[in-house]
Amino acid sequence: MIDSFLPSLGAKVVVASSSDENHPPENITDGHTNKFWMSTGMFPQEFILRFAEPTNISAVTVDSYNVKHLKIERNTSQNANQFESVTEKEFQQTEGHLQSNAISLNGSSATHLRFIITSGYDHFVSVHRVSVQN
Amino acid sequence: MVKLRAKCLLVGDAAVGKSALSHMFHSDGTLFQKNYSMTTGVDLLMKCVHIPDSGDSVELYIMDSAGKQTLVESCEKMWGEVSLLCLVFDLTSEQSFANCSHWMERVRAHCRSLHLPGVLVGNKSDLSTRREVQASVAQEWAESQGLEYHETSAKEKENCDAPLLALARAYHSLYQERRETIQNLGPG
Ligand SMILES: Nc1nc2c(ncn2[C@@H]2O[C@H](COP(=O)(O)OP(=O)(O)O)[C@@H](O)[C@H]2O)c(=O)[nH]1
Ligand SMILES: [Mg+2]
C-alpha cells in the first residue's frame, strides 16, 4: 500500500462550500497539516477532489478538527456531478490535537471524491490534509 | 475577506414583536422563504451584515419561530443546528420577560454543550408609558445569561439594526477565536 499525498496524484480541490481567503481549500491537498481549510459556518459543508485520471483508492486519511460526521461519495465521470455514496464515518472528538481518521474505500475507482461534513463538534471545523492510499 | 454563515434563532412569547422585528431586519435584505410558516411554524429570512473595519461579513439566516405554545414542539424540530440566539420580549409585558428563562432553557437543551452567542431584545420601547420591565433589570438578567441587551421599537424603526450587528460581531469574534485555536493545534 502506497501512501500518496495528493499533489503526486495530480489531485486538487475543485469545489468547496466555504472559503476564508487565508485558509483556502488548496490547503487540504498540499500534503501538510500545518495549513488548513476552515469552514465558515453552518452544516453541511463539502469539498470535492478531482484526480488527474481514474484512480483506485483503497483508503483515505483525513486530518481534521471538530468534524463529527463525514460522508464520502465518488464518481468516475469528467464532471463533478452524479455521485454515488461510498461510505460514512463518525469521528471522535479531540482536544488540543488534530483528528486523524483512516477510512477504507475498498479500492473504489474515482475521478472525483466528494467529502460531505454533515455535522461538527463546534460551529466551525477545519480540514488540514487528505491523503490517499492506492 | 471572509463571509461567515450563521443560523439565528428568533424566539420569545407570542405578540412580543418577533415578526415585526424580522420585517425590519429584512427591509433592506433578502426575503428568503416567507410564509413557510403556514405548514412548519418557521419563517426563514436572510440578512447580510458587514463587520465594520474588516471587509468581512456574516450572512444571518434568521428563523422566526411561532410563539404560540401549541406550535413550540413542532418548531423545535425545525430548529436543527443553531449558531446564534435572538431572544425577544415585550417591554410592556412583565410576563413575556419572565418567560425568557423558559425560552433559554429550551434553547440550551436543544443545543446541548454548544456555545451559543446571543442577544436579549426588549421590544416596543415606543410604548414608554406602559413599560413594565426596567432596562437595568433586563440588562442584569441578560448578563447573567451571557447575552447582550438591546432595546428596540419595530414600530418606530428604532435601534433595530443594533441587535443584528451585535450578533454578527459575536459570531465573527467566535470565528477568529476558533481559528486561532486551530492554528495552535498539534498534529493528530
Ligand atoms: N407599539 C409597538 N407595537 C409593536 C412593536 N412591534 C410589534 N408590535 C405589535 O405587536 C403585535 C405583535 O407583533 P408580531 O410581530 O406579530 O409578534 P410575534 O408574535 O412575536 O411575531 C402586532 O400588533 C405589532 O404591530 C413595537 O415596537 N411597538
Ligand atoms: Mg410572529
Image (cartoon, helix red, strand yellow):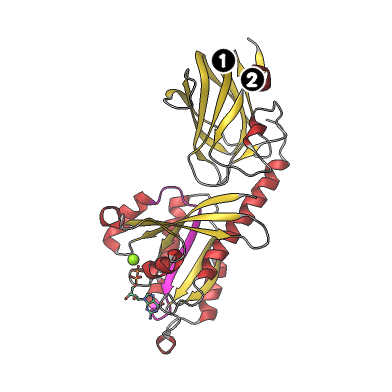
Q: Nearer the viewer, residue B82 or B52?
A: B52
List the residue tagged with mark 2: A10
Numbered disc 1: secondary structure: strand
Which residues make up the magenta segment? B79-94
For the question of whether residue A120 can be seen, the reply is yes
Which is more N-terminal, label 1 or label 2? 2
Query: Residue at (37%, 67%) from the top-left corner?
Result: B19
Q: Chain of mark 1?
A: A
Do the dots labelled 2 and 1 sit on one chain?
yes
Comparing B70 with A113, the one in front is: A113
Q: For the image shown, how many numbered marks are present on the structure? A: 2
Q: Amino acid at mark 1?
A: Glu
User: Marks 2 and 1, how far apart in space?
Assistant: 8 Å
The residue beneath circle 1 is A53
For the residues bearing labels 2 and 1, Cβ distance under 8 angstroms: yes
Residue at point 56%, 23% (across, down): A50
Residue B146 in view in this figure? no
